[in-house]
Amino acid sequence: MHEETQLGQEERADYSSVRRWHRCKVSLSMRLVLHGPAGVEYMYAHGRDISEGGMAVYVPTELNVGDSAALEFTVPYSQEKMLLKAFVRNREGFRYGIEFIDLGQRERELISGSCRALMLLQ
């Protein structure tokens, strides 16, 4: 059973030294695709802090740690729209930590290339 993780701003742990992938600051409009008992539901969301492993997503709905969804978006400096499967790994209010699952080589390359380009501009 998964427990909801909620930390206040002053209590937030710093995991930057143990992360598998570097996080890149972005501001992305996207769609969250949920499959539920009533069928497929689409919601607009906002993505931040992307890496090859996942991202932070702000979406005005109740999701639980462990829920699965799909994210549809385009990374900066790319024209290619991606549809990635993901799990909710943590949450704080309507900010969700999303882990990508079954990420293909092409998607990894698009994300890492976008992050490299953004790092040059920061």
Image (cartoon, rainbow, N blue to C red):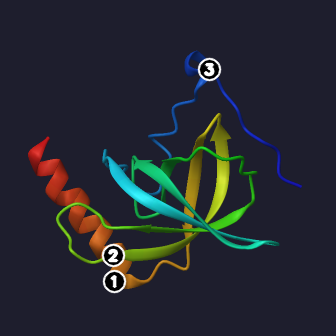
Task: Find disc 1 in the rendering and name its residue.
Answer: 106
Q: Amino acid at mark 2?
A: Lys
* Secondary-structure class at tag 1: helix
Residue 117 placement (x, y as % from top left): 15, 58
Q: Quadrant of the image for the N terminus?
A: bottom right
Task: Find disc 2 in the rendering and name its residue.
Answer: 81
Residue 113 placement (x, y as % from top left): 22, 67
x 18%, y 49%: residue? 119
Depth check: 36 or 11 in front? 36
Residue lying farthest to the top in this orientation:
10
Is 90 placed above or below 78 here? above
Quadrant position of residue 108: bottom left
Q: CA distance from mark 3 to mark 2?
A: 36 Å
Q: CA distance from mark 2 to mark 1?
A: 12 Å
Q: Is residue 57 left or right of residue 26?
A: right
Q: CA distance from mark 3 to mark 1?
A: 36 Å
Q: What mark, if any, has residue 11 been given in the picture?
A: 3
* Secondary-structure class at tag 3: helix
**How would you rate the neighbour count of disc 3 (Cα within 10 Å): few for under 14, some for 14-19, many for 20 or more?**
few
- Earlier sequence position, callout 3 versus callout 1: 3
**How would you rate the neighbour count of disc 1 (Cα within 10 Å): few for under 14, some for 14-19, many for 20 or more?**
few
Q: Quadrant of the image for the C terminus?
A: top left
Residue lying farthest to the left in this orientation:
121
Residue 72 placement (x, y as % from top left): 45, 69
Residue 19 can be seen, yes or no: no
Is 54 placed above or below 38 here? above
Residue lying farthest to the bottom in this orientation:
105
x 57%, y 61%: residue? 99
Residue 61 placement (x, y as % from top left): 66, 47
Q: Is residue 57 left or right of residue 28?
A: right
